[in-house]
Image (cartoon, grey):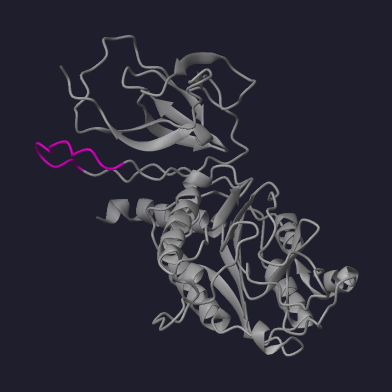
């Protein structure tokens, strides 16, 4: 035992070094229910409870949360957001959640603080100066180097400003559809122009809005990546709203590369750019006598390789007859193909659409195992032993191998 203690000490120190380089996860959560300058109809019931529920859920899954709720002024929100953004470092994940009123002005969505004045048609410049542009918040986090920014907006309600005839400040209902910047995943409580319900009519036992009660439940699921989260929330909210009946279909827009490998409920495994964890040889131990091979384990969630590591081709197995694949084996497979077009995705020698060569065309029935990842590219190996790279946008999971004849 004494002989292996130095090795264990080195191993533990290296683990601490790697942990120190791990990306952090931050969340800025806001719930505004009080709008004293607007009419009684503009006051909301659920945003404070919504923000509290989201903050608790994000804290539970490992986020460092900044929470503002109730009466939140523009200055107060900007000051707290500035401090929040200062803590974000390159490689981190940042979530912004807002529940309250929002408006769309010329295709840009604005979040309304408590001290927004009653704005009449023709005063759009005043509205812009007293509200917070959604895109400004996400851009500030990207400028800080956040690798993943998730914007969750439960503000798709009726326009709270008074109308003059048929004119209003911004859209009369809901928010605008906006394409997020690179590295941003946006999730809205309703599609463009739709109204998000603050509560269900009648006796509603839930303290949360229709959207947020579903979002809180789904974000705790470690099996859901960002894309799955968006689709699950969309489907569940739409079903719940239809019981009223009401049409509310949440919308999500993704510009995060590798979003299928990012889960809010799991620690972010993407390493910081430039991080170089030290490789440590395992401490030698005597193998147990006649140790049986362990059963196949479920495919793990693959951590991204550091961006500074030069692309490497996947080693190819020696030519041999294709092995018989057990029908119980689980594989990844191509998704997002165009049946009316090429209907295949390229297996490439390097993680690049231009560098390297195309090794094969993988059709909709192809099966492969994920063995690594670099950036948006996934390293895979076919049952035949051939290895290569496939773009992550075209990788789905999971399928069973067809039964052998």
Most foreground residue, 42 or 51: 42
Q: Can you tell which quarter of the image residue 121 is in?
A: bottom right
Does residue 378 appear left or right of residue 163 in this picture? left
- Where is residue 266 shown, x and y percent of the image? 44, 58
Does residue 379 appear left or right of residue 290 in this picture? right
- Where is residue 235 shown, x and y percent of the image? 44, 55
Magenta portion: prevailing SS class: loop
Residue 84 within the magenta-colored segment of the rendering: no
Q: Residue at x 77, y 85 (%)?
A: 115
Does residue 133 appear left or right of residue 206 in this picture? right
**Which image quarter holds the N terminus?**
bottom left
Q: Residue at x 56, y 83 (%)?
A: 48
**Which image quarter holds the C terminus?**
top left
| Position above or below: 208 against 307 | below
- Where is residue 206 shown, x and y percent of the image? 41, 79
Does residue 147 appear left or right of residue 332 in this picture? right
Number of numbered callouts drawn: 0
Most foreground residue, 324 or 176: 176
Q: Residue at x 42, y 65 (%)?
A: 240
- Where is residue 104 shown, x and y percent of the image? 74, 63
Q: Can you tell which quarter of the image residue 284 is in?
A: top left
Residue 289 within the magenta-colored segment of the rendering: yes
Range shown magenta: 286-298
């Amino acid at each position: 035992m004494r002989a292996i203690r130095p090795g264990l000490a080195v191993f533990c120190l290296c683990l601490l070094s790697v942990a120190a380089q791990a990306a952090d996860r931050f969340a800025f959560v806001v719930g505004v229910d009080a709008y004293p300058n607007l009419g009684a109809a503009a006051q909301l019931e659920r945003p404070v409870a919504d923000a509290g529920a989201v903050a608790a859920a994000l804290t539970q899954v490992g986020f460092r949360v900044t929470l503002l709720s109730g009466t939140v002024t523009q200055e107060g929100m900007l000051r707290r957001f500035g401090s929040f953004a200062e803590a974000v470092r390159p490689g981190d994940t940042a979530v912004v959640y807002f529940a309250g009123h929002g408006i769309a002005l010329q295709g840009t969505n604005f979040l309304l603080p408590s001290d927004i004045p009653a704005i009449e048609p023709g005063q759009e410049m005043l509205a812009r100066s007293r509200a917070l542009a959604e895109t400004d918040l996400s851009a500030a986090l990207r400028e800080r180097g956040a690798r993943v920014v998730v914007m969750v907006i439960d503000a798709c309600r009726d326009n709270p400003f008074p109308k003059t005839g048929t004119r209003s400040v911004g859209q009369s209902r809901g928010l605008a559809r906006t394409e997020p910047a690179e590295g941003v995943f946006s999730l809205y409580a309703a599609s463009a122009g739709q109204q998000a319900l603050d509560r269900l009519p009648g006796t509603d036992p839930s303290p949360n809005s229709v959207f947020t009660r579903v979002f809180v439940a789904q974000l705790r699921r470690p099996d859901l990546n960002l894309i799955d989260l968006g689709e699950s929330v969309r489907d569940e909210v739409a079903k719940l709203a239809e019981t009223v009946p009401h049409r509310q279909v949440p919308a999500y827009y993704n510009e995060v590369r590798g979003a299928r490998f990012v889960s809010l409920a799991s620690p972010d495994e993407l390493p910081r750019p430039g991080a170089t964890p030290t490789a440590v040889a395992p401490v030698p131990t005597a193998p147990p006598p006649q140790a049986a091979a362990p059963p196949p384990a479920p495919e793990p969630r693959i951590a991204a390789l550091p961006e500074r590591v030069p692309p490497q081709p996947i080693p190819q197995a020696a030519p041999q007859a294709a092995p018989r694949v057990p029908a119980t084996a689980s594989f990844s497979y191509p998704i997002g193909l165009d049946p009316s077009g090429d209907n295949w995705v390229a297996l490439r020698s390097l993680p690049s659409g231009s560098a390297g060569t195309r090794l094969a065309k993988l059709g909709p029935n192809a099966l492969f195992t994920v063995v690594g990842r670099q950036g948006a590219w996934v390293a895979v190996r076919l049952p035949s032993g051939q290895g290569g790279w496939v773009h992550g946008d075209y990788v789905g999971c999971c399928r069973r191998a067809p039964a052998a004849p």
